[in-house]
């Protein structure tokens, strides 16, 4: 007896491949040639607009999801362009316009894009590079399974191999997802 394929709902662990571009086709990122993304559904582990589109999909499904900025990386915040002393940058100069650099903030290290270079300061755009963009995802669902009790307790997936979770691993790695 074969069970019907599991469809995506809260507390499912989903494995998928993706291609991401913005609506103008100018930004592309994909999981091709890399590991697929594994996430626990229903816990805000991926972009909200994409998570909504995932509901009800099954292993083997391919689809395109178009996500408006407010359900993606948010609108651009003009106040997030800030003049920052060079000494606060974790990335060493010389700097060039358009370059991504790391800056030390009260909330830890953040990435910013250089919009202007001065002698002692740089103007940094701290918006997410995809803020204000409509995102177009081409998705292929690879696997859908039930989460383990441990995954539910942690609020994230632990990978297809179910790697031994000794709490020595860096939970930050779970957050590097679209
Ligand atoms: Zn964990």
Image (cartoon, grey):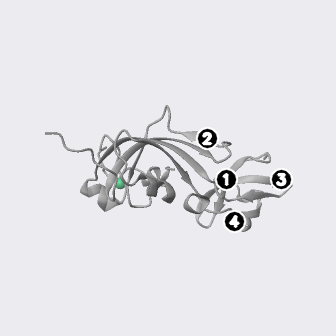
Mark 4–mark 3 Cα distance, whole angstroms, equals 20 Å
Left or right: 66, with 102 as reference point: left
Q: Which mark is residue 28?
A: 2
Image location (x, y in percent) of residue 41 = 37, 56
Q: Earlier in the sequence, mark 2 or mark 1?
A: 2
Residue at the spot 61% in from the left edge and 62% down from the top edge: 74
Q: CA distance from mark 2 to mark 1?
A: 27 Å
Depicted 106 relative to depicted 21: above or below: below
Callout 4 touching callout 1 (CB < 8 Å): no
Mark 1 or mark 3, earlier in chain: 1
Disc on the earlier residue, 2 or 4: 2
**How far across and how far down the image is residue 72, in percent?**
56, 58
On screen, residue 78 above or below 66: below
What residue sits right under mark 4 in the picture? 77
Tell me if residue 61 can be seen: yes
> Helix, strand, or loop for circle 1?
loop
**Counting residues from the N terminus, which is met first, the one under dot 4 or under dot 3?**
4
Task: Judge the density around disc 4: few (<14), some (14-19), many (≥20) Cα neighbours within 10 Å.
Answer: few
The CA span between labels 4 and 1 is 23 Å
The picture places residue 70, in percent across and down from the top left corner, at 59, 63
Q: Nearer the viewer, mark 1 or mark 3?
A: 3
Q: Mark 3: few, some, or many residues within 10 Å (few <14, many ≥20)?
A: some
User: Which residue position holds label 1?
Assistant: 90
Q: Which residue is mark 3?
A: 117
**Ligand 1 sits in quadrant:** bottom left
Residue in the image at 27% along x and 44% along y: 5
């Amino acid at each position: 007896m074969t069970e019907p394929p599991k469809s995506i709902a809260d507390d499912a662990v989903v494995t998928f491949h993706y291609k991401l571009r913005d609506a103008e086709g100018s930004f592309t990122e994909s999981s091709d040639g890399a590991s697929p993304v594994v996430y626990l559904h229903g816990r805000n582990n991926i972009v909200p607009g994409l998570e909504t589109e995932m509901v009800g999909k099954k292993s083997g499904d391919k689809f395109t999801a178009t996500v408006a900025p407010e359900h993606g990386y948010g609108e651009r915040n003009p106040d997030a362009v800030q003049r920052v002393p060079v000494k606060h940058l974790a990335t060493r100069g010389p700097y060039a316009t358009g370059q991504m650099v790391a800056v030390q903030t009260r909330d830890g290290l953040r990435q910013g894009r250089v919009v202007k270079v001065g002698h002692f300061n740089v103007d940094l755009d701290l918006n997410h590079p995809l803020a204000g963009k409509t995102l177009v995802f081409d998705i292929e669902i690879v696997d859908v399974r039930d989460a383990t009790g441990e995954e539910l307790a942690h609020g994230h997936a632990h990978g297809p191999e179910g790697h031994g979770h000794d709490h020595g691993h860096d939970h930050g790695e779970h957050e590097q997802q679209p």
